[in-house]
DNA sequence: AGTACTAACTTTGAAATTCAAAGTACTTTT
DNA sequence: AAAAGTACTTTGAATTTCAAAGTTAGTACT
């Protein structure tokens, strides 16, 4: 138990970041607006959590134009996938006695 | 997705509280010292998180003497079990696309 | 040309959370 | 009498989180 709880990653305790990572585990690239709508967030709040995940190098950014509008998309890096996966392993282990 | 993330309970985002609740889902009563050792916490830190769970009425306290020493134990209330279970449901749903 | 709009932020400042460290009260052991 | 155990409470500082407002840069309408 002592070990399990310490394996939980502080980067993922916030539910916004948990939501972002979940989206990015399932979808290779997700754009800003979609994330914002799916997670029901303001621009600022989403941007700040994205920034912290970027600083940890858990996600990467791609900027392009679609038609004439800018489109910013995000993807989980290999590091990010590993870290998130480890976090989920720890969660699972912590809770495996559920039933 | 929008709904799922909002179902996550703020009371359980902290890993200490997650650990406490996990212990109390599996064991009917767990004493202070055991919790402290299992979760590798200082007295103060454990006490403060216990207090917040108590204030939410998610756990209840029992004080007794065993031999001549005081023993304080904790148990998840029905409300607490329900809330935690709902939180886990939300987590599970959020992550079910994992594989 | 001017106004409004969209996308994606950044900044600001305040509130809430978290934590370590120290202090407390009472009891037991040595 | 001194040290240690049990279970806290208090304090204060650091960190985190958030909403709200402001910014930048290009697009579209009028």
Image: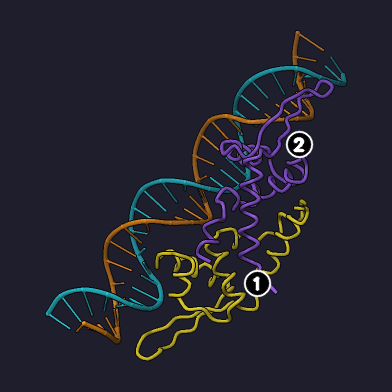
Chain colours: A purple, B yellow, C orange, D cyan
* Sequence-earlier tag: 2 or 1: 2
Tell me which residue sits at (56%, 51%) in the image.
Answer: A9
Q: Are marks 2 and 1 on the same chain?
A: yes
Callout 2–callout 1 Cβ contact below 8 Å: no
Secondary structure under the numbered disc 1 in the rendered image: loop
Residue at point 76%, 59% (across, down)? B93
The spot of residue D13 in percent (x, y) is 36, 48
Q: Is residue A19 above or below residue A60?
A: below
Classed neighbour count for the residue bearing mark 2: other residues with Cα under 10 Å, few (<14), some (14–19), many (≥20): some
Front position in the image: B91 or A34: B91
Chain for disc number 1 = A
Q: Residues within 10 Å of mark 1 (few under 14, many from 20)?
A: few
Above or below, A34 relative to C2: below
Q: Residue B6 lies in what quarter of the image?
A: bottom right
- Residue at image mark 2: A29
Picture coordinates of residue A51, whole percent (x, y): 60, 36
How many numbered marks have been drawn onto this rendered protein structure? Answer: 2
Q: Residue at the location (61% across, 78% down)?
A: B77
Q: Nearer the viewer, mark 2 or mark 1?
A: 1
Dividing the picture into quadrants, the one containing residue B45 is bottom left
Above-or-below relation of A11 to B63: above
Q: Which residue is mark 1?
A: A97
Horizontal side, residue A88 vs residue B17: left or right: right
Please state the horizontal and vertical placement of residue A69, each as a whole percent of the image: 79, 24
B8 relative position to A5: left or right: right
Quick check: A55 above or below C27? above
């Amino acid at each position: 138990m002592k070990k399990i709880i310490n394996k939980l990653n502080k980067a993922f305790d916030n539910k916004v970041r948990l939501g972002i990572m979940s989206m990015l585990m399932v979808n290779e690239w997700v754009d800003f607006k979609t994330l914002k709508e799916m997670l029901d967030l303001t621009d600022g709040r989403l941007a700040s959590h994205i920034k912290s995940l970027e600083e940890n190098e858990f996600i990467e950014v791609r900027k392009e134009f679609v038609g004439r509008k800018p489109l910013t998309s995000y993807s989980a890096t290999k590091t990010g996938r590993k870290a998130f996966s480890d976090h989920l392993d720890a969660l699972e282990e912590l809770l495996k006695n559920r039933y």
